[in-house]
Amino acid sequence: MEDNHIYQYSFVNALMAGVSDSGISVEKLLSKGNQGIGTFTRMRGELLMIDGKIYQLLGEGKTREPDEIDQIPYAVGTKFVPQKTSNVRLESKESVGQLLKQFEFYSENAFMNYRFDGRFESIKCRTVKGQEYEGQPLAEVGKNQQVQTYHDIEGTIVGFQSPEIWQGFFVAGNHMHFVSKDRKDGGHVLELSDGEGKLGVAKAVNIHMELPTSRAFNDAKLSIDDIGIKAVEG
Ligand SMILES: [Zn+2]
């Protein structure tokens, strides 16, 4: 993969339909980039790839480094090379979108890949506990999640901003996962306040999509569900 191209395996609508029984291996995702986000089979925990390593964030201080053969039913990754880096203050999760607009190469209709390293006054993350039965849709799985707020914590956010019209392929808008500096805590970012640190940003205009070939995917009833995605991934 070339620098700052996006590789994506499966899409969010497939998770919404509960397709998460299999996917690409950890080893394969690592071959596609050095940072990214996603989930694991049966939607157990949150995936974060950073500096060429993959973590399974399970909440309550539990983080696992998966085996190379573990399966990933959904992920987005990139070989991130920042086109611009600046020291910023993040007041809230929403302020990330505002800051991205200040980069001269910004476009609402392209993809923005970013990484933020710094300290937060607080950051609220969730980790989903996983499907309770095969094929359970993401909207239901998301109800069984643990939410934790970390205070005065150092760490890294990996994020992607995708255009509204890509809702369902990606999570439209800003989708970010956080991991603490000691790599022990983190999850899907719900809220944050007062982050100080370094923001690196790159624009992506090349997307490589790979679809699952599993029977679950082939037989799934896929649909468009903007409200449902916003409820579970917002
Ligand atoms: Zn997420």
Image (cartoon, rainbow, N blue to C red):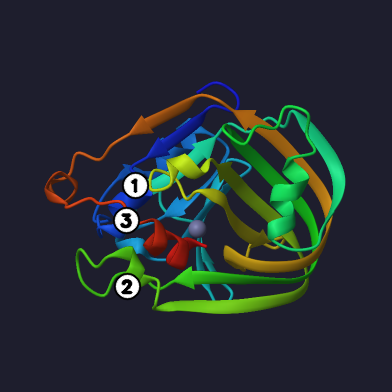
- Disc 1 under 8 Å from ligand 1? The reply is no
Q: Which residue is located at x 48 percent, y 38 percent? A: 30
Residue 210 vertical position relative to residue 22 in the rendered view, above or below: above
Measure the alpha-carbon separation of dots 3 and 2. 11 Å
Q: Which mark is residue 69?
A: 1
Q: Residue 136 occupies which quadrant of the picture?
A: bottom left
Q: Is residue 166 left or right of residue 85?
A: left
* Circle 3 SS class: helix
Residue 63 higher or lower than 143, as above or below: above
Residue 233 visible within the image: yes
| Disc 3/disc 1 C-alpha distance (Å) | 20 Å
Secondary structure, mark 2, is helix
Mark 2, residues whose alpha carbon is within 10 Å: few (<14), some, or many (≥20)? some
Task: Name the kind of residue labelled 3 in the image.
Answer: Leu
Is the residue 119 above or below the residue 224 in the image?
Answer: below
Looking at the image, is mark 3 or mark 1 earlier in the sequence? 3
* Element assignment for label 1: loop
- Residue assigned mark 3: 15
Relative to 45, 212 lies left or right = left
Q: Earlier in the sequence, mark 1 or mark 2?
A: 1
> Residue at (30%, 63%) from the top-left corner?
42
Q: Which is nearer the eye, 101 or 191?
A: 101
Instruction: State how far apart marks 1 and 2 are (Cα).
Output: 27 Å
Q: Amino acid at mark 2?
A: Glu
Q: Which residue is mark 2?
A: 140
Position of 47 with respect to 110 (left or right) is left
Q: Are marks 1 and 2 in contact (CB under 8 Å)?
A: no
